[in-house]
Image: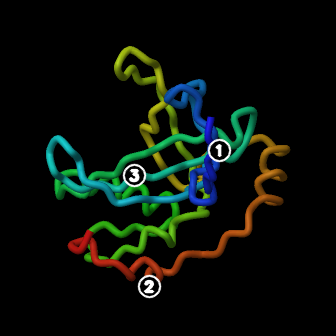
Amino acid sequence: MPKLKVDFSGVDPDIRRGGGVAHIPEGDYLAKIVSSEIRESEKSGSRYISWKISVHNGEFKGKTLYHITSLKPEALWNLRNFIHAATNKNVAGKALNVDTSVLEGKVIAITVEDDEYEGKVRSRIVDTRPKDELEVDEAEEEEEAEDESEEEVDEEELEDVDLEEL
């Protein structure tokens, strides 16, 4: 059999087995925004942001979940809530240019519920809010303080990419 040289340097470091979907118990968690990607739905052609989120505390620390925020006008409330969760700033009623990378690394509170998709149970993020709205025990608070090197987000930092350009 011939040998192949394969460069895995650009491959996502998260190990996925059998294409399985992430599943953790329903509940509230602290989570870190890892990355974001603007995508287009194959079915509807509408654009959305796919967020990669990592559980930041407790037994499931490091478990990866995904969250979608549609860019359809009638669904922008979800992106507004997500931005508020990450920045603790209310952007309702404002026209902003949004650089999603500014939100990466921010810690938020999430609520996870079970969802069945194609016969498999997976975890779905059903709510996002500022991390200070989640009660965590003292040991987890100390762990979070050690892990966290966050900066306050200035509204001007959000204004690098126009939502209409997305």
Which circle's residue, 3 or 2, is located before the other in the chain? 3
In this rendering, which labeled residue sits more in front, label 1 or label 2? 1
Query: For the view shown, which residue lies furthest in the bottom direction?
Result: 156
Q: Secondary structure at mark 2?
A: helix
- Taking the image as shown, residue 14 lies to the left or right of residue 103, namely right
The answer to which image quadrant residue 58 occupies is top right
Query: At x 53% / y 25%, what residue is drawn?
Result: 18
In this rendering, which labeled residue sits more in front, label 3 or label 1? 1
Query: For the view shown, which residue lies furthest in the front direction?
Result: 1
Q: Amino acid at mark 2?
A: Glu
Residue 98 image point, x, y percent: 37, 74
**C-alpha span from label 3 to label 1:** 36 Å
Colour logic:
rainbow
Residue 99 visible in this rendered orientation of the protein: yes
Which image quarter holds the C terminus? bottom left
Which circle's residue, 3 or 1, is located before the other in the chain? 1
C-beta proximity under 8 Å, tags 1 and 2: no
In this rendering, which labeled residue sits more in front, label 3 or label 2? 3
> Which of the numbered marks, if any, corresponds to residue 3?
1
C-beta proximity under 8 Å, tags 3 and 1: no
**C-alpha span from label 1 to label 2:** 51 Å
Q: Amino acid at mark 3?
A: Ser
Residue 131 image point, x, y percent: 60, 54
- Taking the image as shown, residue 95 lies to the left or right of residue 58, namely left
Residue under label 3, please give it: 50
**How many other residues sit within 10 Å of disc 1, few (<14), some (14-19) or many (≥20)?**
few
> Which of the numbered marks, if any, corresponds to residue 156?
2
